[in-house]
Image (cartoon, rainbow, N blue to C red):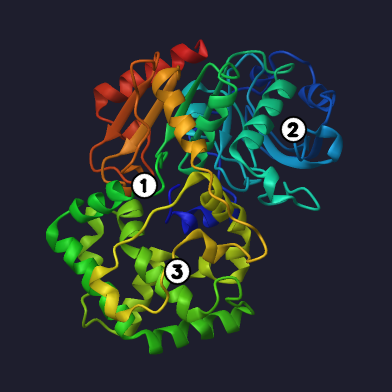
Amino acid sequence: MKRGRIGRLVAQAAAAVLLAGTAAVPAAAAEAGPADIRAAIEAVPGLRIVEEKPAAPGFRFFVLTLHQPADHRHPERGGFEQRLTLLHRGTDRPTVLYTSGYTVSTGQYRSEPAELLDGNQVSTEQRFFGTSRPEPADWEDLDIQQAAADHHRVIEALRAVYRAPWISTGGSKGGMTTVYHRRFYPQDVAGSVAYSAPNNVDDRDDTAYLDFLRTVGTPECRSALQAAQRALLERRTTLVARYQAWADAKGDAFRLVGSADKAFEIAVLRAPFMFWQGRGQAACPAVPAADASDDTLYGWLSDIAQLPVYADAVAKQFVPYFYQLGTQLGYFQVETDHLADLLRYPGATEPRTFVPCDVPLRYRPQAMRDVDRWVRTRGEHLMFVNGAADPSVAEPFRLGAGSQDSYLYQVPGGTHSTRIAQLPATDAAAATATLRRWAGV
């Protein structure tokens, strides 16, 4: 994700998501294959059922763990339990490997590909997130190749039970993770659908992101956003005091970021990006005027930029994310010229702000260049679905002469939550047909 969708992802990770879009079918129809799917899962080496939870008719839902090496190159050095969930439909159905790129929710959630294929879904938690963390943690073990190896072992373990074709998918950082997995294990799945997946090939060049934010939407809306930013910073004394009081009441603090004042400034700087990413042109009338009340300005910023995510209780959960940004995934700069006289913390939005000082950050530019080159020269059975108004994909994955049976779709005016169902009808039909073909449905 490229950045700015953190608050939304926190809400997804923290709350159980109800199973949607499923048709009730006789339970027996979901039990094609083993007579007892629980026994079949329990027989998989390294896999452990944590619990089975109630599910909609025609499904069974399990919370699982799979033992993973902390370092796949040296499995003898110990490991950790990676948390998974399994939404079982039937062993004769395709299986979708889904990841958000962060923690996994233990509530039932069915991704769009799983709905379109009426398939099973295995959802994975990214290494170092949630409970899927080696102890002690060696940060050098958190990279895209190690995470890809995790996903490879998940598929290898469960393929003995689910032998029909597999499809992988994810959105935002999960979409990036999906592509990285395919880069290192291109034959693991029959196809991949990556939604709103950024592709920051050159972390030194943020031109694409800055140009996008300078032209997206209407000039009037962009001006209103800048005016709201200035008004917020001009009233920072009052508003930061409110922010600090909120944290105090919650028993929270800003030790990781440094202070409520710095966290507030970061939120203000990121507000336009997050606005276009999550809301879009339709929300422009709700941007507060510069002379709006303190309550209105603060409430808008808290809603758009998700103020709670910069306090320790949430920010510490996302240290692995910012570590990845600072070592391989890359980040982007925000526009600051119109606020230069009001800013106090140069470079505040950089990943270093969100990673403890004792954790080294050494950026390795070759990782993203390698993945980008692979997509353009050897990638196959890849589908990218992006929103035209989403700044996260200002620098998207692009197909090349070597991309085989791969497709790039764009939703006009779409934001970061873009889906196949939102594509123009002809594109939606083509994308759905391709997905079903890949999955053998």
Q: Residue at x 42, y 39 (%)?
A: 197
Question: Contact (CB < 8 A) between labels 3 and 1?
Answer: no
Q: From the viewer's perspective, is 281 left or right of 250? A: left
Residue designated by label 2 = 72
Residue designated by label 1 = 392
- Which is more toward the observer, 187 or 58? 187
Residue type at numbered disc 3: Ala
Residue type at numbered disc 1: Ser
- Neighbour class for label 1 at 10 Å: few (<14), some, many (≥20)? many
- Which is more toward the observer, 120 or 104? 104
Q: Position of residue 309 (x, y in %)?
A: 52, 65
Residue designated by label 3 = 348
Question: Contact (CB < 8 A) between labels 2 and 3?
Answer: no
Q: Position of residue 180 (x, y in %)?
A: 53, 32
Q: Position of residue 324 (x, y in %)?
A: 56, 49
Local SS, label 2: loop
Instruction: Tell me where residue 256 sits by quadrant.
Output: bottom right
Q: Is residue 252 above or below residue 322?
A: below
- Which is more toward the observer, 246 or 31? 246
Q: Residue furthest left?
A: 219
Label 2 and label 3: CA atoms lie apart by 35 Å
Q: Residue at x 57, y 34 (%)?
A: 98
Q: Position of residue 109 (x, y in %)?
A: 56, 40
- Neighbour class for label 2 at 10 Å: few (<14), some, many (≥20)? some
Local SS, label 1: helix
Is tag 3's residue or tag 1's residue first in the polypeptide sequence? 3
- Which is more toward the observer, 121 or 334? 334
Residue type at numbered disc 2: His
Q: Is residue 192 above or below residue 368?
A: above
